[in-house]
Amino acid sequence: MSIHLNVGDGTFGSRTDYAAGNFPNALVALDLDADGDLDVVTANRYDDEVTVFLNQSSTVGAHDSDELPTVTRLLPNYPNPFNPQTTLVFDLAQPSPRMHLAIYDLQGSLVRTLINESMDAGRHEIVWTGRNERGQSVASGVYMARLEAGSVSHMCKLILLR
């Protein structure tokens, strides 16, 4: 398999060849580590081999851990689908006197409030263990995470498979 990695300026570098089993019959590109870069997963049904390639290059607009983010956003959770827990990562471009992050079911009912407090600017993460406000495990299904910070609101889909 050949991959062209993102070199960080919106272009891709030269081809890099990787061994990924004999005749990979499935290829998926997704952001496994929630860094904004697409990663690649291959699967081979003949020898049950799965190969993961994490794209470790930086992208335009990415920031080092010492720099503050320039936008407030909720990044994709990982892993997704998940069981028993998933990590939600979010950036706050400025301090938020009231930051709210909660999980809702598809009917819009509150399942669990994860954060409801003031927070400093920066990258943050929190783990949701698939439990509701009473500490009970919730059923398999699709849930929505909603981040509200000031006038900004973002949502992402979470898939729980038990």
Image (tube, rainbow, N blue to C red):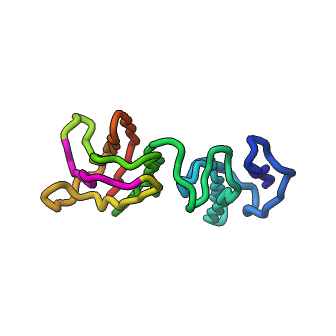
Main SS category, magenta section: strand
Residue that lies at the very extreme toward the left in this rendered image: 134
Establish if 151 lies above or below 32: above
Among the 4 quarters of the image, the one containing residue 152: top left
- State the residue at coordinates (38%, 49%): 95
**Quadrant in the picture for the N terminus:** bottom right
Among the 4 quarters of the image, the one containing residue 10: top right
- State the residue at coordinates (25%, 53%): 117
The front one of 82 and 100 is 100
Report the side of 9 relative to 158 (left or right). right
Report the side of 68 relative to 40 (left or right). left
Report the side of 110 relative to 123 (left or right). left
Question: Residue 40: x percent and y percent?
Answer: 65, 53
How many numbered marks have been drawn onto this rendered protein structure? 0
Question: Residue 140: x percent and y percent?
Answer: 29, 51
The front one of 154 and 70 is 70
Q: Is residue 106 magenta?
A: no
**Quadrant in the picture for the C terminus:** bottom left
Residue 28 in view here = no
Q: Is residue 116 magenta?
A: yes
Report the side of 45 relative to 161 (left or right). right
- State the residue at coordinates (64%, 65%): 49
Q: What segment is highlighted magenta in the picture? A: 110-120
Question: Residue 141: x percent and y percent?
Answer: 31, 46
Residue 119 in view here = yes
